[in-house]
Image (cartoon, rainbow, N blue to C red):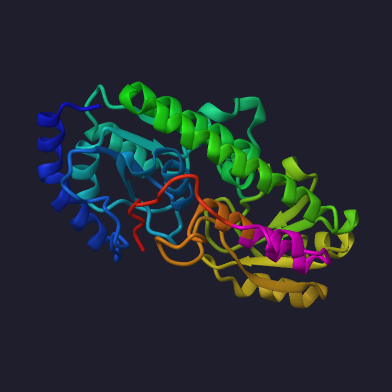
Amino acid sequence: MSSPGRGMQRRLGAVAICVALLAACGGSDGGSGAVEDDGRLLVVTTVAPITSIAANVIGDRAQIVGLVPEGTNSHTFEPPPSAAELLSTADVVFINGLQLEEPIKALAEANLPDEIPLVELGDRTIDPDQYKYDFSFPESEGKPNPHLWTDPTLVKVYAQLIRDTMVDIDPEGAAIYDTNLQAFISIVDEFDGVVGATFDTIPVDQRKLVTYHDAYAYFADAYGWNVVGAVQPADFGEPTARDVIKLIEQIKAEGVPAVFGSEVFPSPVLEQVANETGAIYVDDLRDDDLPGEPGEPDHSWLGLMKFNFVTMTDALGGDSSGLTGFIVRNSAIDEASYPQ
């Protein structure tokens, strides 16, 4: 771990920097200890699901500060100027990668000391031949679908990468990171089993997804679903009339029973698509906006996935009771800062 002198020096400025950053993002530290001047390592993350996964592995061994406010379009988020100062004090930065947070990555590369790791979790989890390209992420644009965290099996790889990185920079904490990692993997495996059993209650011909934001390509691979389409185009603007007509035709041809809007991206267009096709319109899927408030059990990657999977199951004619009864919990204390 950092020597006490270096750690204290880094923290002297970090408190004011973190508070300024959170204020600029329109949020608070949720009552966490992530901005206390206590000499712990400073871990900077990006989107809330990654912040939560990191907290499950790291616990209170380090300060964890997320950069991307929840309910924000993470693809287009521009970090405030105070983020540069925060990044310059970090001991490690974890981002999703796969070109999700390019402005933050560029800012980190410009401000991180050479010896500080910038870990792109997605790029280290799958190889280029596993990249998913689709309507919102066409191969012609060169940006693969980055939403690996919707597949629990890939989240375990994220957690392992976080553990390995933390052990490299803080070998004295190895036992803590190992214990937390194994507990987290056990919870994810249990959750994965319940999810699979729940999805088995949905008729096979109804395991079809039409969403506004195309976040479920890797999820679909893991659980044998078919992503029929998504409304949001690659430029994150509004679809053309031709796009909408094509999607309506696909939904009718596939017999899709429900279409799913996004809490972050409200879309009158998708509601219109549902009306035109007779599909049920469900408008509250969450992409990376965690349920509840920071500090609550449901405010976690696991809580996010449970919410979305229950929502999908109910709308598509399955029985979500087993998944509803799954108890959401973390493998370690979560004191991370989540900008709101």
Identify the residue at horizontal 59%, vertical 29% (top origin).
126
Give percent across and percent down for residue 161.
Answer: 48, 29
Identify the residue at horizontal 22%, vertical 44% (top origin).
86
Quarter of the image with the N terminus in it: top left
- Along the line of sight, the residue nearer the viewer: 143 or 187: 187
Q: How many marks?
A: 0
Residue 143 seen in the figure: no
Identify the residue at horizontal 43%, vertical 41% (top origin).
54
- Residue 69 vertical position relative to residue 333 in the rendered view, above or below: below
Residue 198 seen in the figure: yes
> Looking at the rendering, which quadrant does residue 5 occupy?
top left
In this picture, residue 113 sits left or right of residue 315: left
Identify the residue at horizontal 29%, vertical 62% (top origin).
31
Is residue 320 part of the magenta span, yes or no?
yes
In this picture, residue 181 sits left or right of residue 152: left
- Residue 90 vertical position relative to residue 232 in the rendered view, above or below: above
Give percent across and percent down for residue 283.
Answer: 63, 71
Quarter of the image with the C terminus in it: bottom left
Give percent across and percent down for residue 167.
Answer: 38, 24
In this picture, residue 150 sits left or right of residue 226: left
Give percent across and percent down for residue 13.
Answer: 11, 45
> Looking at the rendering, which quadrant does residue 255 occupy?
bottom right
Is residue 129 part of the magenta span, yes or no?
no
- Along the line of sight, the residue nearer the viewer: 89 or 233: 89
Part of the protein shown in magenta: 307-327
In this picture, residue 243 sits left or right of residue 80: right
Judged by its main secondary structure, the magenta piece is helix
